[in-house]
Image (tube, grey):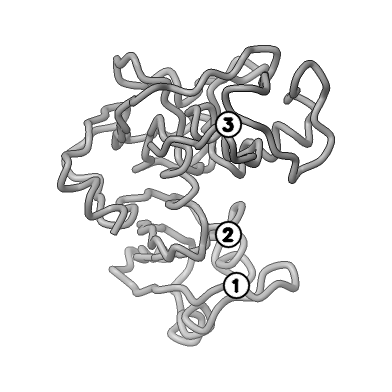
Amino acid sequence: MQNFHLAEPVRIQKVIAQAGIASRRAAEKLILAGEVSLNGQTVLKMGQKMLVGKDHLSVEGRRVKLPQGQKTQVYALYKPKNCITTLNDPEGRTTISDFFPRTSARLFPVGRLDYDAEGLILLTNDGELAQQLMHPRHKVWKGYFVKVRGIVENSALSTLRKGPVIEKRKHQPVRVKTLHTVNDKTWLEVFLREGTNRQIKKMLLDLGYPVQKIKRFQVGTVSLGDLQSGESRALSQEEMKQLTN
C-alpha cells in the first residue's frame, strides 16, 4: 500500500480505497449515497480532495484511519450459488462475508458475481489493487463456464467475438468457445475483460440462448483450482506478483 504525502491533497475516494474500506468505484457510490463526510460535513462533490493527517474523514459515521504499513492480503474464495456479493443484506440473505477466511484484515470482494452465479471471487484489504483488477483499462480477463439452453450456432459466437451490443451499447470483444453439448444444452467457455452488470446473461439471451448456470473459474492468472463451494485460500506471493503484472 502506498503512503500519502501529508502536503498533497488526495481525492477522497482514493483515501477510502487506501484504507481498505472499499474499491474506488464503490467509494464513489458511498459518496453519491451521502455516506461520506469530511470534517463533519457531508461530501457532495465527487472530485473533492483532502489532506491526509489533517482532515477528518468518516464513512457511514465511522472515522477512517489509514493503516500504517498494513500488508496487502488477497484471498481466492469459491462463492456459493444463491449468495449475494455484499458485506451485509437488509433482506437477510446469505452474503459473501459469511464465507470470509479468519483474518485480522478488513476484507472486501473485488467486483461481484450474480446472486445465482458461483465460482471464483477475490477478496482483499487493498482498495487500490481492487480498482486495478476491476477497471477494464487494465485488461484483466475473467473466465466463466456457462450453460445455456439451446445448441449455440457459430454465427452467435462470431457476434460475441466481435463485441456484443447490449442495450444499444457496444461492448468489448469476448473470447468464447463451445465445450460440449448435452441434449438441447450447450456448455460454453467465456472470457470477459469488461464484465458489466449481468453481461453474460444479457448478451446470450439477446442471441436466443437463456443462461441456466454460470461458474467463474479464473480471474487474471488466478484460477479456482481445487477449492470447493464456500472454501478460500490465501494467494501466494508469486500469484500476487503475476496478478498485478
- Looking at the image, residue 16 sits to the left or right of residue 34; the answer is left
- Residue nearest the viewer, comparing 244 with 114: 244
User: Which amino acid type is marked by label 3?
Assistant: Ile
Query: Which circle's residue, 3 or 2, is located before the other in the chain?
Result: 3
At x 69% / y 17%, what residue is drawn?
60
Mark 2 — residue? Answer: 199
User: Which amino acid type is marked by label 2?
Assistant: Gln
At x 15% / y 47%, what residue is drawn?
238
SS for dot 2: helix
Where residue 92 appears, as percent x and y from the top left, is 60, 15
Separation of marks 3 and 2 at Cα, in angstroms? 28 Å
Separation of marks 1 and 3 at Cα, in angstroms? 29 Å
The answer to whether marks 2 and 1 mark residues whose Cβ atoms lie closer than 8 Å is yes
User: Which amino acid type is marked by label 1?
Assistant: His
Mark 3 — residue? Answer: 16
- Looking at the image, residue 149 sits to the left or right of residue 30; the answer is left
- 10 Å neighbourhood of mark 3: few (<14), some, or many (≥20)? many
Q: Indicate the quadrant containing the C terminus: top left, top right, bottom left or bottom right.
A: bottom left
Q: Is residue 12 above or below residue 244?
A: above
Q: Is residue 22 above or below residue 200?
A: above
At x 59% / y 75%, what residue is drawn?
164
Mark 1 — residue? Answer: 171
- Residue nearest the viewer, comparing 189 with 162: 162
Where residue 16 appears, as percent x and y from the top left, is 58, 31
Where residue 34 appears, as percent x and y from the top left, is 80, 27
